[in-house]
Image (cartoon, rainbow, N blue to C red):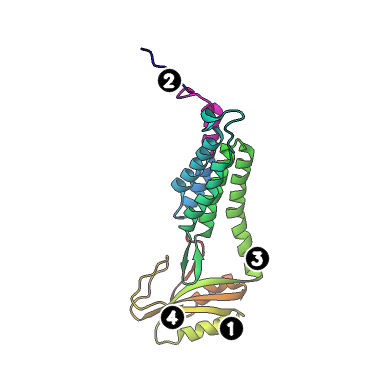
Amino acid sequence: MEIWLAGPPLFGGAGQGSRQLIELMVAFGLTAVIGLEREIQGKSAGLRTQTIVGTSAALILLISKYGFADVLAPGAVILDPSRVAAQIVSGIGFLGAGLIITRRGAVHGLTTAAAIWECAAIGMAAGAGLLLLAVAVTVLHFVIVLGFTPLARRLTSRLSGSVRLHLIYQDGRGILHKVMQACDAHGWQLTALAADPPGAPRTDESRPAGPGEVGVAMTLSGAGVLRSTRVLATIDGVTAIDQLDDELE
């Protein structure tokens, strides 16, 4: 008795050709470049995460395009090839939400969450065969993260802006009063101030206050406020000052 297996070949069937492999590799390469940039910046979702997201998104879109060809019948079974790909957007939204945290009233992780969403979009574009658009968005990513940050800092140094600082100073010497005087002299407004809980470890990169020291987190706003770290560091009794990055990703 001979048994014949119906259906397309296991390898090399529709949707499994060299074009699809190229699209997968393009998604892999482009999102790996973005992931490498995130890795260099010390963000939590770096090379591996971004590459996995982008390559997987490309694979899901290819499945949506070609994965159901064996069950389609003209006039009987008609499927929308975008139905599976559409779920990538909502699924990546949950992944990105897990990277966003709120610490001391500030939101962290937005850029990395957006980068994951971006990698998914690049992977989808590559999987759809829109290679030129995938490359263009990858280039624009570096324009945004490398070009916009210096521009924003330059504008903030000239225009009104805000900055979050963690300040450690020696207790009992009236240092905080001197800090407020320096801020007033430069026209900076104190919009938020919170003392570190006693004995609580810091959750960011700044060091905790030591014996005889007090740590506070403050938000300053005003023109040229980016110079505040240099100005306040010159005050006698200030032992450490760090600018808190709102993009701890």
Closest to the camera, between mark 4 and mark 2, is 2
Separation of disc 1 and disc 4 at Cα? Answer: 18 Å
Q: Which secondary structure lies at badge 3?
A: helix
Q: Are marks 3 and 2 in contact (CB under 8 Å)?
A: no
**Mark 2 or mark 1, whichever is nearer to me:** 2
In the picture, which quadrant includes the N terminus? top left
The residue indicated by pointer 2 is 5
The amino acid marked with disc number 2 is Leu
Return the residue nearer the eye: 134 or 9. Answer: 9
- Foreground label between 4 and 3: 3
Stretch in magenta: 7-27
Q: Amino acid at mark 4?
A: Gly
State the CA–CA distance, disc 3 to disc 2: 67 Å
- Asked if the residue at tag 3 contacts the one at tag 4, i.e. Cβ–Cβ closer than 8 Å, the answer is no
Q: Secondary structure at mark 2?
A: loop
Dividing the picture into quarters, in which one does residue 213 lie? bottom left
Tell me if residue 15 is in the magenta stretch: yes
- Image x and y of residue 107, in percent: 51, 66
Q: Earlier in the sequence, mark 4 or mark 3?
A: 3
Does the segment drawn in magenta span residue 177? no
Q: Nearer the viewer, residue 95 or 79?
A: 79
Q: Is residue 125 above or below residue 199?
A: above
Type of the residue with mark 1: Asp
Identify the secondary structure beneath mark 4: loop
Residue lying at 40% horizontally and 67% vertically, measured from the top left: 203
- What residue did someone put label 1 on? 184
Name the disc covering residue 155, or none.
Answer: 3
* Image coords of residue 228 (percent x, y): 55, 74
What residue would you read off at disc 4?
237
Farthest top residue in view: 1
- Mark 3 vs mark 1, CA separation in Å: 21 Å
Q: Secondary structure at mark 1?
A: helix
